[in-house]
Amino acid sequence: MSDEMAVIAARCRAEGGLTKATLGELREQLGYGKLGKWVLVEVAEAIKDAGLGYFPLAPLDPKHNETPRKEQSVWIFDASEGDLRCQVIEIVLDPRDYLDEDVRSILNGVAGGDSEALTAEQKLERIREIVLPDVSAGE
């Protein structure tokens, strides 16, 4: 894990795997005084190196955010967990890393609350989250 994002990573995990951070906070984690277009690229890389992910993508993309502001924010999530929330976020952002049937089953299950749309492993994970919340969060 990247030490640069250790504070943000700890906060994210303390908040259950999802937190919101301003670009100003993220910039400070890397030790920069100003928030330029190319600092955005370094922030995005540091987030990924820390085992985290973020959304929306545009605020940390210099092609879409030509004048970054410290008040702009992104949601940071724990990508190392691979839990259902992480899978949903990753599928929505870029489904290419998932099999078609996984995309369909995960999104159908979440959108409709339909457990029949989930795979057996996903159903077991949901049961673990309900029955053993501390264990599945700490794995």
Image (tube, rainbow, N blue to C red):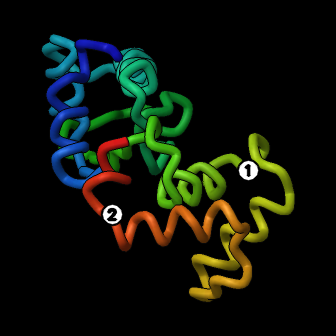
Q: Say which quarter of the image contains residue 139.
A: top left
> Any mark on residue 132, and which?
2
- Do residues under tags 2 and 1 come within 8 Å of each other at their CB atoms? no
How dense is the environment of label 2, judged by Cα within 10 Å: few (below 14), some, or many (20 and up)? few
Residue at the image point whose x is 52% and y is 60% from the top:
84
Residue at the image point whose x is 75% and y is 41% from the top:
97
SS at badge 2: loop
Q: Amino acid at mark 1?
A: Pro
Q: Where is mark 1, residue-wise?
A: 95
Nearer to us in this view, 81 or 91: 81
Task: Judge whether 123 appears above or below 47 on screen.
Answer: below
Q: Percent x, y for residue 7?
A: 15, 28
Q: Percent x, y for residue 44?
A: 43, 26
Q: Percent x, y for residue 74?
A: 33, 47
Residue at the image point whose x is 24% and y is 14% from the top:
4
Alpha carbon separation for disc pair 2 and 1: 29 Å
How dense is the environment of label 1, judged by Cα within 10 Å: few (below 14), some, or many (20 and up)? some
Task: Judge whether 85 appears above or below 14 on screen.
Answer: below
Nearer to us in this view, 112 or 58: 112
Nearer to us in this view, 98 or 92: 98
